[in-house]
Image (spheres, coloured by chain):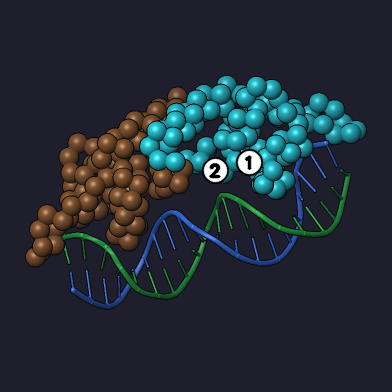
Chain colours: A cyan, B brown, C green, D blue
Amino acid sequence: MRIIGNKWTGSILWHLKDQPMRFNEIARQLAGASKKVLAERLKAMEENKLITRDVISSKPVAVQYKIAARGLNALTILEELKNWTLENDL
Amino acid sequence: MRIIGNKWTGSILWHLKDQPMRFNEIARQLAGASKKVLAERLKAMEENKLITRDVISSKPVAVQYKIAARGLNALTILEELKNWTLENDL
DNA sequence: CTGGATCCCGTAAGATACTG
DNA sequence: CAGTATCTTACGGGATCCAG
């Protein structure tokens, strides 16, 4: 729960699942999450090796976030959790 | 996460998995959790239908907590989560 | 014995503004 | 563009005392 139980973590993984994305790109998808929270989560997720962070250009700064192997199977677990809630309550 | 992401919820399910237990019996197993927290969790878990609560005697009051169907498959998910953490980190 | 009532605290998370 | 800084709020959880 320390690793995947935080708010937005699942959504971030979901958006990164098919293609890598840049910071503001993710921010746009996650309307409702402030940049502060997003930066916080991304940092933690990188530390937990759920995603990787690559600076792909400076001037202007561009950073790319990509889902990692651990992030992919974490997502699998989260999907089961989602299915469970759908089957049971709301 | 609202339903199974709380602290102790998993442990409680684990202890109830094989046999029903009484309040203080659970309390003894969960050294570290105060009675307030335990009561809080049990109540929430009953509302979420993860467990059932039965008063089996008055004078002295005795209450039995039993795992419910939803609790059992929730436990399945939690085990997968645990396996995932074991495979990945610590 | 099974809880309920309070009080306290740490941390997640939101809002907003600012920066290299 | 990709964050940082600062402030504030909400809530889970712990400790302790009380009650039917």
- What's under tag 2, amino acid-wise? Asn
**Residue marked by disc 2:** A6
**Residue under the point 32% across and 61% down:** B36
**Residue marked by disc 1:** A41
Q: Secondary structure at mark 1?
A: helix
Q: Residue furthest right?
A: A59
Instruction: State if disc 2 and disc 1 touch (CB < 8 Å).
Output: yes
Q: Quadrant of the C terminus of chain A?
A: top left
Find residue D7 and report its image quarter.
bottom right
Find residue D9 and report its image quarter.
bottom right
Residue B26, placed above or below residue A18: below
**Residue under the point 34% across and 30% down:** B76
- Counting from the top left corner in percent of width and height, residue B50 is at 31, 43
Q: Chain of mark 2?
A: A
- What's under tag 1, amino acid-wise? Arg
**Residue under the point 60% across and 30% down:** A14
